[in-house]
Image: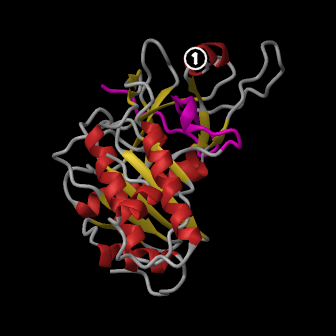
Amino acid sequence: MIITYQEALQTGRIADVSVSSRFASFGYSETLRQISRLGKTREADEFGRVRPSERAIVVASEVAFRMLRSAAGMQPPSDVSTDRDGDIRVVWESGDRTLELVCPYEPSQRPYIFYSDSNEYAIAYDLSVYRLGRLLAWLNGAIHAFPR
Amino acid sequence: MTSAPIRLSNRANSLRRVRNSELNASGKVRKSAFMPRREGQDRDGLSVSIETAELSVVHRAMFEGDGHRAPQILVGSVRDLPPLDVVARPTAEDPAHALITGMPDRTLGIEQLATVEHLARELAKRATAYTFPDAGENRPAHSAM
C-alpha cells in the first residue's frame, strides 16, 4: 500500500513529523506518484523485466517515507524507472552529487542506495532515517564531506 | 595455430541495443542500458556491435524497431574507464559483434556492486543517441576493426 502525503497527514501517521517545507512534501508525493506508475507498466519485454514486484514498490515507498521523516529536505526525483531485472531505481541529483535508491524485484535482495560525486562513489545498505537524512543533507549541500 | 584477436580502434563506434525507454527524447541514456543483469546473463560482457558502413543495413534491422533503439559510444570512451575494454566477438549473424568486458561480478560483494553501478553510470553518461544513415547516403567507411 502506498501512503500519500495527504493521506498520511489526515490519518496522523506522520503527525509527529516535522516538515516545514512544502517542497519536501511535493518531492515525497512526486516520488510516490512515479513509483506507483511503474506498477502499471507491462510485465516484461525482450530485455527482461519491466514491471517491478509489489514488494519492491512497497519497499521503495517506505524508504521514501523515511526520507521525508528525516526532514533533511526531499526534492522531486530526477528519474524513476526499472532496470532489466525489474529493480526500481529512483535518482536524485544536485550538481555533481547523485543518490540512487535501488529496490530489487526479488524480496530476497536487499535495497540499497548508490551515491556518488565527481570523485567518489559508495553504496549504503543502512536505510535508517538517520542515515538517509545524512545522505540527503550531503546531496543538498548541508554536509560537505563525502558520507562514509 | 590460432589467429590473433582483432584489436578494435579507439575511434570505432560501438552500438548498444537498448529499450526505447532507456533513451529519452533529449538523447540522454539511462544507466540501466549498461547495467549487467544480476543473474549473470551479461557475465561474458555487454553486447554491442561495431558500426561499419558495410553492415549498416544489417545493424539498422537489428537495432531499430518496435521497442528498441541503439545509442552509440566510442570504444576509446569505454577504455577510458579501466578495467573496461571492447573486444571483437564476431557471430554468424553479426560479424561486427563485440563485447564490453571488464565489469566486476556484482554479486561478489558491496565493493564490486559499487564499481558496477559506477561504471554503468559512466558508460551511460558517455553514450549518445545514434541515427542510422539513410539508405544510399554516402557515409565515410572508416576502418573500425
> Which image quarter holds the C terminus of chain A?
bottom left
Residue located beneath label 1 in the image: B66
Q: Examine the structure image and report whether residue B122 is included in the region drawn in magenta.
A: no
Judging depth in this view, the residue of A90 and A63 nearest the camera is A63
Residue B72: percent from the left, percent from the top?
A: 61, 38
Judging depth in this view, the residue of A107 and A37 nearest the camera is A37
Residue A39: percent from the left, percent from the top?
A: 40, 35
Q: Is residue B48 above or below residue A26?
A: above
Residue located 33% across and 61% down the image: A63
Res. A147 in view: yes
Task: Examine the residues drawn in magenta and state their main secondary structure.
Answer: loop
Is A105 positioned to the left or the right of B101 in the image?
left
Amino acid identity at mark 1? Asp
Crowding at dot 1, Cα within 10 Å, few <14 / some 14-19 / many 20+, comes out as few
Residue located 48% across and 39% down the image: A37
Q: Is residue B22 above or below residue A112?
A: above
Residue located 47% across and 76% down the image: A19
> Which image quarter holds the N terminus of chain A?
top left
Residue located 29% across and 39% down the image: A54
Q: How many marks?
A: 1
Q: Which range of residues does the magenta coloring cover? A: B1-27
Residue A2: percent from the left, percent from the top?
A: 36, 48
Judging depth in this view, the residue of B106 and B92 nearest the camera is B106
Q: Chain of mark 1?
A: B
Res. B86 in view: no
Q: Is residue B46 above or below residue A48?
A: below
